[in-house]
Amino acid sequence: MASTLVRPVNGRMVGGVCAGLARRFGVSANTMRVIFVVSCIVIPGSQILIYPILWALIPSER
């Protein structure tokens, strides 16, 4: 079963959004990061705005 959506304290690269989403959906953090980067390259747009919004909305693990 997937855990709740939080930004982990360990394993962050920038804000922990990809690591938190990866943990929530049961995939590796690197997989989630690759998906994010590829989506920015293939279909550029709102991803760059969504990341900081999620960073602000998803609580930290602490």
Image: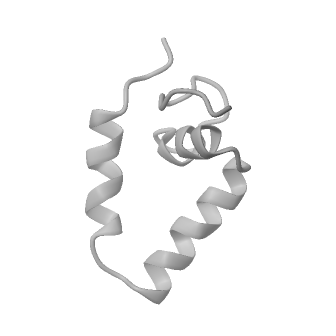
Residue drawn at point x = 35 percent, y = 40 percent? 55
Q: Is residue 36 above or below residue 32?
A: below
Q: How is the image coloured?
A: one colour
The percent position of residue 56, horizontal first and vertical second, equals 28, 36
Q: Nearer the viewer, residue 2 or 32?
A: 2
Check the image and name the residue furthest to the top: 62
Percent across and percent down for residue 29 are 68, 48
Looking at the image, which is closer to me, 4 or 37?
Answer: 4
Task: Please state if 35 lies on the left or on the right of 62 as rendered.
Answer: right
In this view, the residue farthest toward the front is: 1
- Against 17, residue 9 (above or below) is above
Image point 33% across, 44% down: which residue? Answer: 54
Residue at position x 54%, y 48% from top? 18
Q: Where is residue 1 in the image (x, y as percent from the top left)?
A: 68, 32
Furthest toward the bottom, the residue is 42
Res 33 quadrant in image: bottom right
Percent x, y of residue 24: 58, 38
Q: Is residue 62 left or right of residue 58?
A: right
Q: Report the side of 30 relative to 38 (left or right).
A: right
Q: Is residue 26 above or below residue 39?
A: above
Please give the name of the residue rendered at 63% of the width and 34% of the height, measured from the top-left corner.
2
> Count of labels shown?
0
